[in-house]
Each structure stands twice: as structure tokens, then as C-alpha cells.
Amino acid sequence: MKKVGIITGASSGLGRAYAKHIDKVMDLDELWLIARREERLVTLADSLACDCRILALDLTERGSIDMLQQALEEEKPWISILVCAAGFGKFGGAEDMTARETEDMIALNCRAAVEVTRVCIPYLHRGSRVLEVASCAAFQPLPGMNLYAATKAFLLHYTQALRRELATRGVLVTAVCPYWLKTEFMSVARDTANPEAVRHTPFAMRPEAAAAWSLTMSGLGVGVVTCGPIPFLMRVGGKALPACVPMALWDKLRKI
Ligand SMILES: NC(=O)c1ccc[n+]([C@@H]2O[C@H](COP(=O)([O-])OP(=O)(O)OC[C@H]3O[C@@H](n4cnc5c(N)ncnc54)[C@H](OP(=O)(O)O)[C@@H]3O)[C@@H](O)[C@H]2O)c1
């Protein structure tokens, strides 16, 4: 049985950083790289030591999940690690979002992560790891980034329950909750009707550092990984304070 790693969102940013780090630290037969931009995945695959399978899929399309499921049924691999990193956000309030933005954000950040995970579950075994990339946006509602924060809160809750569901099978499940990262996320997020809804994204972290830290923590069995002190404080604040307090603070900071 082939030991494989599966990474969604591998063409850029955090997903690509995961692919590079996993290639270095894990002994796999194959890495399955998933995203829409095939040429990016080919370039990445060429730079890795591990054999790669490229799945150029638009995960907002329901048929893409069937294609992944079919590939899994044919190969019947042992999935050593699954990383669901595909996702995007848009700056702006509820009234700024188009129907397409709303639909695609929910489809990718919520449904695709859940569906990719669902079709992979039969191929996870004792010691397998699952990393769902949520965000520190999951810890409290965020006006001006409302829908994105809500999708990540959904994913965080889903992942925490999944962790308990799969614990009896010895599968380690981790929600990854980074703060701002230096990736293409920002240019996608600003391509909206109201890019000024969030003016600055200070203290952004390198995706390589977030990938390395969260992979180490997932190996140690940590359930929720905050990448750095700011998301850690947001997690504590989100639990300890009524939501109006972090929201009021965020509302001030995002408009500076
Ligand atoms: N950057 C941040 O500040 C930040 C902070 C916290 C959490 N996150 C989360 O981290 C994850 C990775 O984001 P990133 O920062 O690395 O952003 P990124 O550089 O824009 O990467 C997003 C990835 O998602 C893929 N993707 C987008 N739409 C897709 C679709 N319809 N089907 C399949 N794949 C799709 C993109 O590939 P293609 O375009 O080739 O399809 C790309 O590989 C996301 O879940 C994001 O929400 C980011």
C-alpha cells in the first residue's frame, strides 16, 4: 500500500510551504498536490524529492470531489497526512459581497474541506495526521471580514469534533489557526468591492514558519495550533471576553 500525503491549496502560500516541508521531513511514496493552477503544481512537483501526483481541481465544483474519490478508490493508499489548506477570504462587510464571492467562499472554505476530508477518512490509519487550515479569524466574529471569519469558525468547530471522532482510530487531527501570512491571500482578499474594509495586515508571518511549526505541533498531537503570540492571545481573548470586546478592538485596528 502506497503511503501518501494529500495537500489542497498546494499551488501557493501555506499549502506550497506544507508540500516543501513534508517533502523534507516525512518518508512518503507520493505527494498528491491539489489546486486549480496546474502549471504551478508541476513546477512544485519538479522541485520536490518525493514522487508527486497532480490533481488540477477546482474544489468549489462538486465533481472535483468525485474525481478525488475515484483516484483514492483506484489507488487505495495509506494516507499518512492530509492537509486542507485551500481557502480564500475577501475584505468587506456582508453588503459588499457578491453572490459569487459568498457562494465560492462557503463552497471552498467549508464544503470542500469537509468533503475532501470525508472521502479521505477511509484511507486514514493509526498514526495518520489531518491538518485543517482554519485561521485566528475563527476565534471571534470579524466585522469587515464577516463571512470569511464565519467560514473559519465553522471549520474550527468541525475539526475539533472530528478530532474526537477519529481519536479512537489513532488519527491525529489538528486545526491550524495562523494570523496574517505573507502569501497571495492578501491580493485575493483586496480584489473586492470594499478593499479598504481592512486597511493593514501588520506582523504577517512567513508561510514556511507557520507550516513548520504547525506540522511539529500536529505530530505532538496538539488539537488547535496558533502560529505565534498574536493568534494565541486572540484565542484566549475569544474565549474569555464577550464577543463585543474583541470586535470593538478589531473595528478600531482595521480602520487605522
Ligand atoms: N494568508 C493569511 O493571512 C491567512 C491567515 C490565516 C489563515 N489562512 C488560510 O490559509 C490557507 C492558505 O491560504 P494562503 O495564505 O496560502 O493563500 P494563497 O497563497 O492565496 O493560497 C490559497 C490556495 O488555495 C487554492 N485555491 C483557491 N481557490 C481554489 C479552488 N476553487 N479550488 C482549489 N484550490 C483553490 C489556491 O490555488 P489555485 O488558485 O491554484 O486554485 C492556492 O493554492 C487558506 O485556507 C487561508 O484561509 C491564511
Image (spheres, rainbow, N blue to C red):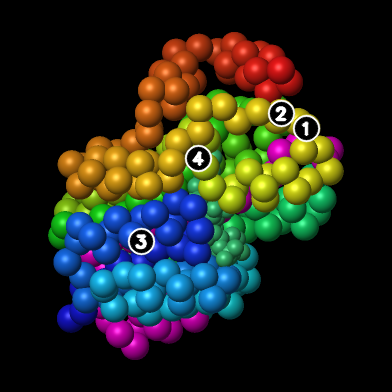
Q: Earlier in the sequence, mark 2 or mark 3?
A: 3
Q: Are marks 4 and 2 in contact (CB under 8 Å)?
A: no
Q: Are marks 2 and 1 in contact (CB under 8 Å)?
A: yes
| Tag 2 residue | 199
The residue depicted at 58 percent of the width and 77 percent of the height is 63
| Tag 3 residue | 19
Q: Position of residue 105 (x, y in %)?
A: 65, 52
Q: Position of residue 193 (x, y in %)?
A: 84, 43
Measure the alpha-carbon separation of dots 2 and 3: 31 Å
Measure the alpha-carbon separation of dots 2 and 1: 5 Å
Q: Is residue 31 left or right of residue 239?
A: left
Region of the chain picked out in magenta, as a range: 67-96
Q: Which label number is shown at residue 181? A: 4
Name the secondary structure under disc 2.
loop
Density class for disc 1 (Cα within 10 Å; few <14, some 14-19, many ≥20) is some
Density class for disc 3 (Cα within 10 Å; few <14, some 14-19, many ≥20) is many
What amino acid is labelled 2 in the image?
Arg
**Is the CB atom of the residue marked by disc 3 within 8 angstroms of ligand 1's nearest atom?**
no
